[in-house]
Image: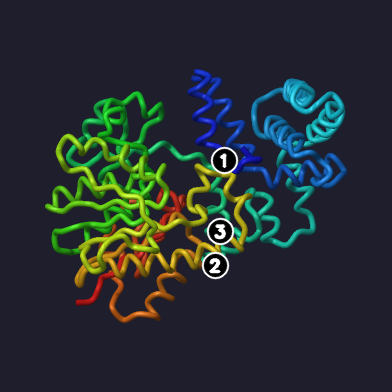
């Protein structure tokens, strides 16, 4: 997964299904992979200290095996001898006998202390934020980005929340299923969204999920789509500009049907457009499915000024979903944020141009980073006079934490959701 940049949660789910692994074995594999990805940077510091050599002197495959072994020793209930022996055997089988001794020696040194002991030793003499980065398994630049946005007394809690695996949330498709139906099948109510339930087991075991009447979707993702529909606008055509993989599209499709409106869903990638069609398949029998097309949002394939609602859920760093994609924190860099910033500006401009006078635009990212959120909106507002902000505080009632100010910023430690950001704008008449 590290070698080809794949998302660990997607690859693991596919492998578990392919090899028919379930129950305790699946839970063990999930924790081993997710935990190792989450703590990779901190484990690397421990490996350097235990190996007494730089990471660049280790083969990538050997380094990954050491990370897996360190997680078993320091964070899982695996006996040291079992963690070491299985790691050594795996190294010999996949890399070669010549590295077995190295893996054995490094992991035995790691086992000489526990995780708290290693972190205390390696934190000695570090600046406060460097120490916090090491202890919460985040790169320093992400710690700095969070520190810009949060009160000092919330910073550690926000970082720690990124390391807690979330409960699976489902969204019912409006008009196709109800929350009460899923609760009757064993789900529990969501925390914030009126369309949400939470489950502890396999979503595919629920009939509503198998039939396309409900789907896996974080509550933060549900809330930003719902909020767009709560601002007043005339019935008409709605545009979902960056629609894949389709969770927000499905929610919008059901709400549009109730509003006597229809949805055009757009994605630049054909495979993501196919996911949108699959996510909204439940509406096909009712003749309410969205129109799904493959198109580049920066080169519109539609006339300007015709949509009453536009959602621009733009490509972003994904820093708001570190709970479910923990490896992203080690793969992203500040330069990536700047490159995305220009694309985000272009897509927001397209979204505004697509809206008709009086229409509502939602700009959404799954990231709290300032350059992807408020900077994009403020820069856009400075450059044009045909839009105004619709305050988010009036659109999103949250039982788990009040919304204040112009924009919506959700946080795992405050709201139990991914760290979604949303700004809502209205096209001036």
Residue 19 position (above or below residue 211): above
Residue 319 position (above or below residue 110): below
Picture coordinates of residue 126 (x, y %)?
76, 59
In the structure shown, which secondary structural element does the residue marked by tag 3 occupy? helix
| Left or right: 418 as drawn, with respect to 7 | left
**Circle 1/circle 2 CB separation < 8 Å:** no
Residue 169 position (above or below residue 85): below
N-term-proximal mark, 2 vs 3: 2
Q: Which residue is mark 1?
A: 6
In space, the residues marked 1 and 3 are separated at their CA atoms by 29 Å
The label on residue 155 is 3
In space, the residues marked 1 and 2 are separated at their CA atoms by 30 Å
Between label 1 and label 2, give the one nearer the viewer: 1
Total labels: the figure holds: 3
User: Which residue corresponds to the image point at 70% horizontal and 58% vertical from the top-left?
Assistant: 130
In the structure shown, which secondary structural element does the residue marked by tag 2 occupy? helix
Residue 203 position (above or below residue 323): above
Q: Which residue is mark 2?
A: 148
Picture coordinates of residue 327 (x, y %)?
59, 44
């Amino acid at each position: 997964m590290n070698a080809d940049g794949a998302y660990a949660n997607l690859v693991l789910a596919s492998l578990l299904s392919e090899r028919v692994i379930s129950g305790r074995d699946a839970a063990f594999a999930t924790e081993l992979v997710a935990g190792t990805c989450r703590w990779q940077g901190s484990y690397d510091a421990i490996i350097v200290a235990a190996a007494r050599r730089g990471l660049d002197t280790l083969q990538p495959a050997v380094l990954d095996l050491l990370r897996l072994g360190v997680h078993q020793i320091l964070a899982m209930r695996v006996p040291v001898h079992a963690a070491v022996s299985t790691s050594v055997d795996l190294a010999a089988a996949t890399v070669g006998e010549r590295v077995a001794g190295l893996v054995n020696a490094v992991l035995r040194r790691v086992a000489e202390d526990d995780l708290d002991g290693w972190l205390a030793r390696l934190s000695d003499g570090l600046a406060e934020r460097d120490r916090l980065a090491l202890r919460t398994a985040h790169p320093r630049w992400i710690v700095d980005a969070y520190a810009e946005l949060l009160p000092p007394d919330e910073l550690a809690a926000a970082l720690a929340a990124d390391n807690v695996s979330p409960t699976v949330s489902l969204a019912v498709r409006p008009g196709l299923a109800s929350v009460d139906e899923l609760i009757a099948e064993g789900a529990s109510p969501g925390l914030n969204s009126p369309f949400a339930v939470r489950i502890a087991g396999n979503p595919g075991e629920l009939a509503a999920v198998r039939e396309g009447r409900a789907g896996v979707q974080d509550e933060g993702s549900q809330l930003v789509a719902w909020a767009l529909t709560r601002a007043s606008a005339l019935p008409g055509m709605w545009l979902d500009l960056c629609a894949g993989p389709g969770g927000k599209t499905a929610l919008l499709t059901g709400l549009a049907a109730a509003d006597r409106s229809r949805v055009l869903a757009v994605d630049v990638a054909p495979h993501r457009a196919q996911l949108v069609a699959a996510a909204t398949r439940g509406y096909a029998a009712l003749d309410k499915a969205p129109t799904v097309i493959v198109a580049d949002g920066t080169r519109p394939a539609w006339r300007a000024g015709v949509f009453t609602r536009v959602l621009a859920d733009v490509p972003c760093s994904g820093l708001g979903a570190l709970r479910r994609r923990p490896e992203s924190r080690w793969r992203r860099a500040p330069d990536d944020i700047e490159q995305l910033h220009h694309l985000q500006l272009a897509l927001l401009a397209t979204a505004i141009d697509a809206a008709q006078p009086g229409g509502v635009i939602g700009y959404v990212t799954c990231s709290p980073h300032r350059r992807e959120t408020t900077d994009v909106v403020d820069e856009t507002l400075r450059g044009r006079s045909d839009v105004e902000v619709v305050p988010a505080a009036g659109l999103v009632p949250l039982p788990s934490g009040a919304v204040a100010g112009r924009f919506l910023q959700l946080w795992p430690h405050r709201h139990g959701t991914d760290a979604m950001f949303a700004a809502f704008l209205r096209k001036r008449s």
